[in-house]
Image (cartoon, helix red, strand yellow):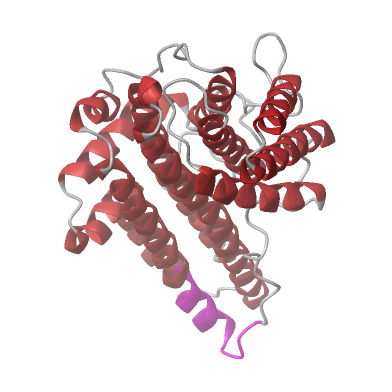
């Protein structure tokens, strides 16, 4: 993953300044705590330009442009890291005694542990999907046509199932947000966040980091899908009972639209074994790629589910955090649906990977 070293260094500086604050808070030395607070603030602000941009953190271009971000795995991994920076700074703000914040040293410790893992991955050149990469699979002993015919529905079902899993976690996150804060973002009457509240500087730095992450996620979703994303989220929210999820996701992903193409492809005479073998390889690789990206989206949802409850500890930013959480959850769901459609080739508007339909066409040409 080609995340800039400047970005990794900035994240690392926040981590170790946060560790110093954690240690100072445990010692109970007020002077040491205040020195650590100032050092953390310097580290947080040193990452940012005067406009709040962070060197090495590049939001993907709007998907309505011709040049969509070529590597959604890298973009999603950077969203994870920036959310973890935000979570750590917000937790640190409670320990720093910033106004209207209730101390939560255990939350700071947990947030720093997660951030430390992200720093390790960044420094080693890994991404948030490391450990989930599937090695080269051995080709089955079955005849090529049979193997390809079996792998095709397996890949489609796996994409649907993973998208269902994202939806379940999103719904769990949305439940924690008061309805009055949630509805505007699900219905689409509000699509942007309000200004950062006037609170302590470390909490503000944390809010800016969370905001950067969610804005990057918003840019990753094709602009043409912005309205549909909220329609999907609302439909999911209204009809999200477990027995209906698989059917609902198949509709959202247009998975059943592949069936006519599948039937026509396998009806062709004299299919070529080498093409079918290559197609099997491509399906396995596509399935693994979708597993990695979906795992990263679930990481985004998991961190948002930890950030949103901080509203109870920092009352002055509660409405902002609830709104940010609602938007982030809706965008995570929208990203999962878009990438599912992209991997299936069922109409993603902006296509990043050659999906199931293309692989099917080439394997049976």
Q: Residue 59 appears at what percent x and percent y? A: 63, 26
Which quarter of the picture shows residue 143?
bottom right
Q: Residue 219 appears at what percent x and percent y? A: 53, 26
**Left or right of 16, for residue 287:** left
Nearer to us in this view, 135 or 81: 81
Nearer to us in this view, 152 or 188: 188
Q: Residue furthest bottom?
A: 141
Q: Which residue corresponds to the image point at 41% horizontal and 36% vertical from the top-left?
A: 310
Q: Is residue 150 magenta?
A: yes
Position of 342 relative to 258 (above/below) = above
Which quarter of the picture shows residue 70?
top right
Q: Image quadrant for the C terminus?
A: bottom right
- Residue 4 visible somewhere in the drawing: yes
Q: Which residue corresponds to the image point at 52% horizontal and 56% vertical from the top-left?
A: 295
Position of 174 relative to 246 (above/below) = above
- Residue 268 visible somewhere in the drawing: no
Q: Which residue corresponds to the image point at 62% horizontal and 36% vertical from the top-left?
A: 85
Q: Which residue corresponds to the image point at 56% horizontal and 89% vertical from the top-left?
A: 142
Q: Residue furthest top?
A: 50
Nearer to us in this view, 242 or 227: 242
Nearer to us in this view, 270 or 274: 274
Q: Main secondary structure of the magenta part?
A: helix
Position of 166 relative to 274 (above/below) = above
Q: Residue 138 appears at what percent x and percent y? A: 67, 82
Q: Residue 6 appears at what percent x and percent y? A: 82, 31
Q: Is residue 230 magenta?
A: no
| Extent of the magenta region | 139-152
């Amino acid at each position: 993953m080609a995340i800039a070293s400047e970005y990794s260094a900035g994240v690392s500086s926040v981590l170790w300044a946060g560790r110093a604050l954690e240690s100072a808070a445990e010692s109970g030395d007020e002077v040491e705590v205040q020195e650590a607070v100032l050092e953390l603030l310097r580290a947080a602000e040193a990452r940012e330009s005067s406009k709040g941009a962070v060197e090495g953190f590049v939001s993907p271009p709007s998907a309505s442009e011709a040049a969509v971000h070529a590597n959604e795995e890298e973009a999603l991994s950077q969203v994870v890291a920036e959310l973890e920076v935000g979570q750590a700074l917000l937790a640190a703000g409670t320990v720093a005694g910033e106004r209207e914040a209730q101390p939560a040293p255990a939350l700071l410790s947990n947030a720093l542990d997660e951030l430390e893992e992200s720093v390790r991955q960044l420094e080693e050149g890994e991404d948030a999907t490391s450990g989930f990469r599937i090695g080269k699979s051995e080709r089955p002993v079955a005849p090529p046509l049979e193997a390809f015919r079996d792998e095709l529905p397996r890949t489609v079902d796996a994409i649907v199932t993973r998208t269902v899993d994202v939806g379940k976690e999103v719904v769990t996150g949305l439940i924690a947000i008061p309805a009055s804060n949630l509805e505007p973002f699900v219905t689409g009457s509000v699509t942007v966040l309000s200004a950062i509240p006037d609170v302590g500087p470390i909490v503000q730095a944390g809010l800016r980091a969370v905001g950067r992450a969610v804005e990057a996620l918003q840019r990753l979703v094709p602009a043409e899908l912005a309205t549909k994303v909220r329609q999907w989220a609302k439909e999911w929210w209204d009809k999200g009972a477990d027995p209906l999820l698989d059917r609902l996701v198949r509709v959202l992903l247009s998975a059943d639209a592949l069936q006519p193409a599948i039937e026509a492809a396998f009806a062709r005479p004299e299919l070529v074994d080498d093409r079918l073998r290559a197609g099997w390889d491509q399906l396995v690789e596509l399935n693994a790629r979708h597993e990695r990206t979906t795992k990263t989206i679930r990481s985004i949802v998991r961190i948002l589910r930890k950030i949103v409850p901080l509203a109870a500890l920092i009352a002055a930013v509660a409405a902002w955090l609830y709104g940010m959480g609602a938007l982030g959850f809706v965008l995570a769901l929208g990203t999962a649906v878009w990438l599912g459609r992209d991997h299936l080739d069922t109409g993603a508007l902006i296509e990043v990977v050659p999906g199931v339909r293309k692989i099917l066409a080439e394997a049976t040409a």
